[in-house]
Image (spheres, rainbow, N blue to C red):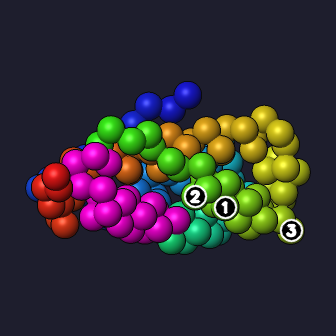
Amino acid sequence: MQLGILATDYGKHSVEKWAAHTASHIIQIASSAAGVQVIEARKLELKVIDILEGHHQAVMDHEQAKLEEHGVARHAQPYDPEAFADTALAEIVAAAKGTRFEEHFANPETVSHISRVLHEHFAASMDIERQWPPTFKERA
């Protein structure tokens, strides 16, 4: 398990920051890696970051829409990252196809790890959106 702290002063994390942070929990390039292996790993990491930017934006937009729709009642509702995590997971595994890492990303243990990371990070993003809702309106 990798422990990390994501800090942003005076507001919510950007989708770019979220994407890079989430990708860092999915792809970790060993310090002993060298040459082409590092280059290919970085290329895959950049693909994953690009994929995750869109998904983190979708999660944030979804949560803002739900806050607008339900107001304070949204805070009592469970986090619902499943659909976002499942779609992102499929795209990440697909991005690894044709690379030297394809077999690793097809491994059920790897898939399970990525799924867990996505669920945790998307739920955390939803929680932060609930703490910093710019469109928050008190509803009766």
Query: Which residue is tagged 1?
Result: 87
- The local secondary structure at tag 1 comes to helix
Query: Residue 100: percent from the left, percent from the top?
Result: 83, 59
The magenta region covers 55-74
**Foreground tag (1 vs 3):** 1
Give the side of residue 16 with respect to residue 98, left or right: left
Instruction: Name which quarter of the figure residue 96 lies in.
Output: bottom right
Q: CA distance from mark 1 to mark 3?
A: 19 Å
Query: Residue 49: percent from the left, percent from the top?
Result: 53, 65
Mark earlier in primary sequence (1, 3):
1
Is 66 in the magenta? yes
User: Given the image, on which type of amino acid does mark 1 rest?
Assistant: Thr
Query: Residue 56: percent from the left, percent from the top?
Result: 46, 62
Give the camera-side residue of 122 and 47. 122
Give the side of residue 129 with respect to residue 99, left or right: left
Query: Which residue is tagged 2?
Result: 84
- The reply to whether callout 1 and callout 2 are in contact (CB within 8 Å) is yes
Give the side of residue 56 with respect to residue 65, left or right: right
For the point 39% across and 42% down, the residue is 77
Query: Residue 12: percent from the left, percent from the top?
Result: 24, 57
User: Given the image, on which type of amino acid does mark 3 rest?
Assistant: Gly
User: Given the image, on which type of amino acid does mark 2 rest?
Assistant: Phe
Residue 92 appears in the picture as rendered: no
- The local secondary structure at tag 2 comes to helix
Instruction: Name which quarter of the figure residue 112 lies in.
Output: top right
